[in-house]
């Protein structure tokens, strides 16, 4: 079992930055690839970014490329640095642990075994 807890969300003005953190307990992150998803009101849960278990491979959805960076500062923590935030980035953000699809270059929800509780990110215009 892996328990995931997100932190670092909040309210920020457009153009600002936030850093989300996902902390793992139980089995370590090193056994899993890890990703971030987000869900805006009335919409589905969308892939945002992912990092392989060894930290060598990262994937991003097109809308965040060049603005967001996923990183692996230590074995049990993953960051999502979000810069140049836009109002359309407003959503509940979830971290998840699972297996990357290297062909599609994403972490899919159905391949994610463990999820955090989610954290709100609100970007005001």
Image: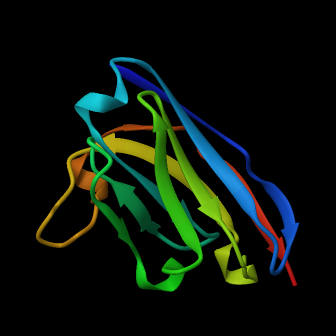
Residue at 56 percent across and 69 percent down: it is 68
| Residue with the most extreme left position | 103
Q: How many marks?
A: 0
Q: Position of residue 117 (x, y in %)?
A: 57, 38
Instruction: Say which quarter of the image contains residue 54.
Output: top left
Task: Give the vertical position of 30 relative to 73 (above or below).
Answer: above
Task: Give the vertical position of 11 relative to 26 (above or below).
Answer: below
Quadrant of the snapshot with the C terminus: bottom right
Q: In this rendered view, identify the residue nearer to me: 17 or 114.
A: 17
| Image side of residue 20 versus residue 73, left or right | right
Instruction: Say which quarter of the image contains residue 107.
Output: bottom left
Residue at 67 percent across and 82 percent down: it is 88
Residue at 59 percent across and 77 percent down: it is 67
| Image side of residue 7 versus residue 46, left or right | right
Q: Position of residue 95 (x, y in %)?
A: 48, 46
Quadrant of the snapshot with the N terminus: top left
Q: Position of residue 98 (x, y in %)?
A: 26, 43
Q: Position of residue 63 (x, y in %)?
A: 50, 84
């Amino acid at each position: 079992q892996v328990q995931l807890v997100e932190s670092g969300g909040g309210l920020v003005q457009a153009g600002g930055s936030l850093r989300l953190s996902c902390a793992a307990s139980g089995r370590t992150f090193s056994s899993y690839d890890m990703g971030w998803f987000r869900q805006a009101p009335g919409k589905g849960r969308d892939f945002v970014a992912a990092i392989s278990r060894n930290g060598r491979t990262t994937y991003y959805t097109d809308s965040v490329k060049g603005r967001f960076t996923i990183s692996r500062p230590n074995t049990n923590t993953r960051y999502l640095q979000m810069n140049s935030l836009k109002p359309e980035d407003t959503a509940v953000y979830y971290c998840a642990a699972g297996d990357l699809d290297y062909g599609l270059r994403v972490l899919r929800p159905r391949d994610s075994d463990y999820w955090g509780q989610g954290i709100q990110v609100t970007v005001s215009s």
